Amino acid sequence: MTFSGQPKKSKPPSTRSYSAKWNSFLDYTQRLLKDLGLGPDDERYAINVRNDSRHRFSLVLRDRLVYALSADGGMHLILMLPPNAPEQNDGVPLVEMKDDAFAGDPAARLYTLPLEVMGFHMERLYPQLLDLCRALLKVTGKKTRYREHHIGDVCRMVYEPDFRVKAMDYVLDEKGDWPGEASGKHRPNNMDREYYCVGTVWTEGEPVASLFATRHLGERLR
């Protein structure tokens, strides 16, 4: 078979194909909070987006980072797991974050997991994460000191399906406007327009859309 004319240029894949992993991260975040009995207004956790030296979407429970989506050195998850997690989960490509060991109970470490293999391993790792989070809530107080950095609009991406769809359209496909308003007192520092999903420095009163102004999140997910 012969072809005439110029070869057709292949279309770049839609960012919708990349949003599946992002949505999976948000779904597990929602599942974790639900299994822990933590609603949107519970002050024992905080959800925020960082773009200083840590380029990530984070869930902090009490005084610990427990679950995150990071673009620092390639897209990966960060999970709080038992100290022996690599031995306990043979075949799962976990890498310990050496500088992030926790003091006190429950004993745990932070590990990274490549985002591309999330679908293969999260169901195995999730119960271990959940058990540690439950233990953490038993030994700590009623409010996280990181709550002042909590971003209500970003939390809505976890809890509200319609809001998430519109937010993902904005972040990944540059479609429409950011669906929410400013919430909380989060003031990120040292913003970098060329990395992750944050735009200009966000001062109180600005819409949370400024966190996603340059939509680099979509590029990092490709």
Image (tube, grey):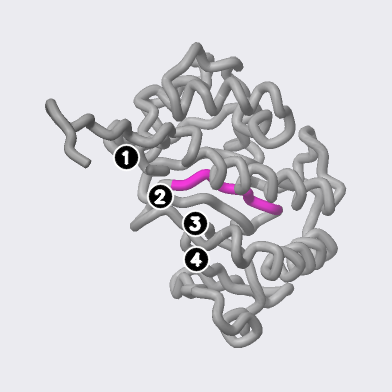
Say which of marks 2 and 3 sits in front.
3
Magenta span has 91? Answer: no
Q: Which quadrant of the structure image shows residue 163?
A: top right
Q: Amino acid at mark 4?
A: Thr
Q: Amino acid at mark 1?
A: Tyr
Q: Nearer the viewer, residue 146 or 14?
A: 14
- Distance between the alpha carbons at the discs numbered 2 and 1: 8 Å
Disc nearer the start of the sequence (2/3)? 2
Disc nearer the start of the sequence (4/2)? 2
Residue of label 1: 195
Residue 220 in percent (x, y) is at: 37, 43
Q: Which quadrant of the structure image shows residue 67?
A: bottom right
Q: Residues within 10 Å of mark 1 (few under 14, many from 20)?
A: some
The answer to whether 191 is drawn above or below residue 119 in the figure is: above
Residue of label 2: 71
The reply to whether callout 2 and callout 1 are in contact (CB within 8 Å) is yes
Residue of label 4: 112
Bounds of the magenta span?
Answer: 56-61
Quarter of the image with the C terminus in it: top left
Q: Nearer the viewer, residue 138 or 82?
A: 82
Disc nearer the start of the sequence (3/1)? 3
Residue of label 3: 115
Label 3 element class = helix
The reply to whether callout 3 and callout 4 are in contact (CB within 8 Å) is no
- Distance between the alpha carbons at the discs numbered 3 and 4: 9 Å
Residue drawn at (30%, 36%), measured in percent from left and top?
Answer: 192
- Distance between the alpha carbons at the discs numbered 3 and 1: 18 Å
Q: Amino acid at mark 3?
A: Leu
The answer to whether 38 is drawn above or below residue 7 in the figure is: below
